[in-house]
Amino acid sequence: MTAGRELNRREFLKAGGVGLLVGIYLSSCGDAPTLSSTLTPSPSATATDQPTAEPTATPRPIPNPDAIMQSGIFIQVDGRGMVTGYIPRTELGQGSLTAMSMIIAEEMDIALEQVRIQHSPLDPAYGDLHTGGSDSISSYFNRLGKAASVARALLVTAAARLLEVPYETCSTTAGQVIHEDSGTVYTYAELVEAAAEIPISDVSSYSDTKAASDYQIIGTPVADLDSRAIVGGSTIYGIDITLPGMLYAALAFPPILRGKVLGFDASQALDVPGVQQVFEIDSGVAVVAENTWAALQGVRALQVNWEAGGNANLSSTSIRDIFLSNQDSSRAQEQQILEADYEVPFYVHAPLEPMNCVADVTSTSCEVWAPTQNPGLALSRISSLTGLHRDNIQIHIPRVGGGFGRRLQVDYVEQAVQISSRAGAPVKLMWNREQDMQHGYFHPLSVHRASADLSQLELPSISSQTFQSWGDLTYAWRSVTNFTDAFVRECFLDEMAYALGRDPYDLRLELLPSSLHRVLDTVIQHSNWGERLPPGRGRGLACWSTWNVTPVAQVAEVSVSETGQVRVHRLVCAIDCGLVVNPNLVTAQMEGGIAWGLTAALKGSIDIEKGSVVQSTFADYPLLQMDEMPQVDVHLVSSDRQPTGVGEMGVPPAAPAVLNAIFAATGKRIRHLPVRPEDLI
């Protein structure tokens, strides 16, 4: 274990009042948590009381970075009784900040309204600063609960010592410490100074986290704490940020993916009213103007000579054909061998909020407003670009209008920083929809051969060929390889069941790990599995354990019209995500993941021709519409496991469940995505 040093109080927050700060962090060797507490300045009286992440800069730093080895989190109780948790995770719409607020409120016996979550200081010393892999709650449940329980124990100890009574005679409720025998009540705010003087070692025997049977908040359905602000329009997204004297920028990207600028003529762009500057940066030509419209019009007026680069002959069709021709068919003639080829296209993330970033770069500092999943990487890249020490760089994280893995990359942050540095002013960079669709990063195209010896009844062997361009053209897309792997295995298991004359559910129970059996049993019980359906209608089953931690099973009920139109009427989902912090948020994430998976199964894909992306807007890369969303029934399987992730877990089973249902309805096997009407006529 690495011992914690004294926390740096002077640098925590620059405001009046006092507060109790409890820190918990792990050594790089993964030892037990180290705890520390201190008396710190508290937020000013004008600070917001909203319990959610704020689109403002994070104070730097909370503790001395030398004292933190990995994954540091901190809880502060200020002089007004407000409790703030500092977590190195971004709210992407998954509801993690609400769940974290619930954990703190539970362990500290306070109302949710007294809790808020802010992002930790952006320094690698504070641990992993990226949000991905559906691990926010699973990573911080124990540590956050422990820090909160220690803070509560310190406050109770402070009250007991003031009253000169045993610790056990005091209790807590609603942000107060109560001594029933004397009728004395202290608010947490009244105790923070005294609590901060107590060594952690004095409360080690009193700071155990609650047993699950004692939970009052955890496990209850709570609305997302940001919902009212989002619906009311007061939430600040990155695209909403404005600064005094700010200019606006747009980029001309090369028509060929990752091409380069050979030269350009800016004369017509500079003639556009409002355009002030035109210059080249690493990824294209920037137009800086007085407003966004002028910047976009300036880009259209540019005349650029592009170098195509190495992707000029890139074609999704040719990649697919090469992959298919490479498939080994040597086993196809063997008796009892079943084989099938499956194809997955390129997909794009297409978040509703396109890439954007505000940057203000001077010779001595850089301040950035970036809706990002990866502020740690952004900080490193900004430092490299500007030559500034990271202590002179501030990154604000506004609310993010959709991440899905796209915002793990920070190209748009780098672009904004380069443009502001050249322009000599704060700049808001805006991508338009076409650019966001055509110049981002893609889920890779792949082709898969599945085969099984039906005489031996074992899981199929699967060989895969995937377009390899990680970090250049392709990158993490919601559920990443789990989506592709689930599509192939679960569709082929259905083919095996049909060839063997077996029920697909029974075959999965026999072949798949026992960890999947409970969700399979649950989804079968609630989906009318085995009941007859009218002609042209069918049910399909699929299951998957994303990252091998969260089992999910789904049954889709679909119909197929005479014109080949697929309609998903109902989708039943069962998930085992361990202890459920907030059932509402788990259900919402399953619904969102299912919508994502159905879009991939039935809607758009990305085609590349001669190095350029064909699709450009939601007109030719359509998303699932609200009137196409099926009835979704989500069932949470009770579990005594620790919480596991849910953000990506609803995605992988959706597509194979639908394709298996299409076969049940029509007798036609579709082995590629997305399904087109012409596949079914």
Image: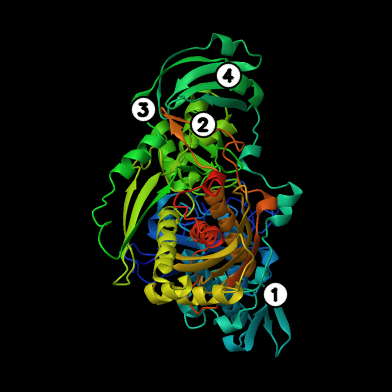
Is 265 situated above or below 601? above
Is 59 situated above or below 458? above
Label 3 crowd bin: few (<14), some (14–19), many (20+), radius 10 Å: some
Of 644 and 289, which appears nearest the observer?
644
| Amino acid at pointer 3 | Asn
Is 355 situated above or below 277? below
Q: Residue furthest bottom?
A: 181
Q: CA distance from mark 1 to mark 2?
A: 45 Å
The numbered mark at residue 641 is none
Q: CA distance from mark 3 to mark 4?
A: 25 Å
Which quarter of the figure has residue 51? bottom right
- Which label lies toward us, 3 or 1? 3
Which quarter of the figure has residue 282? top left
Residue 79 left/right relative to 301: right
Residue at image point 51% right, 73% down? 519
- Which label lies toward us, 3 or 4? 3
Is disc 1 in contact with disc 2, using a CB cutoff of under 8 Å?
no
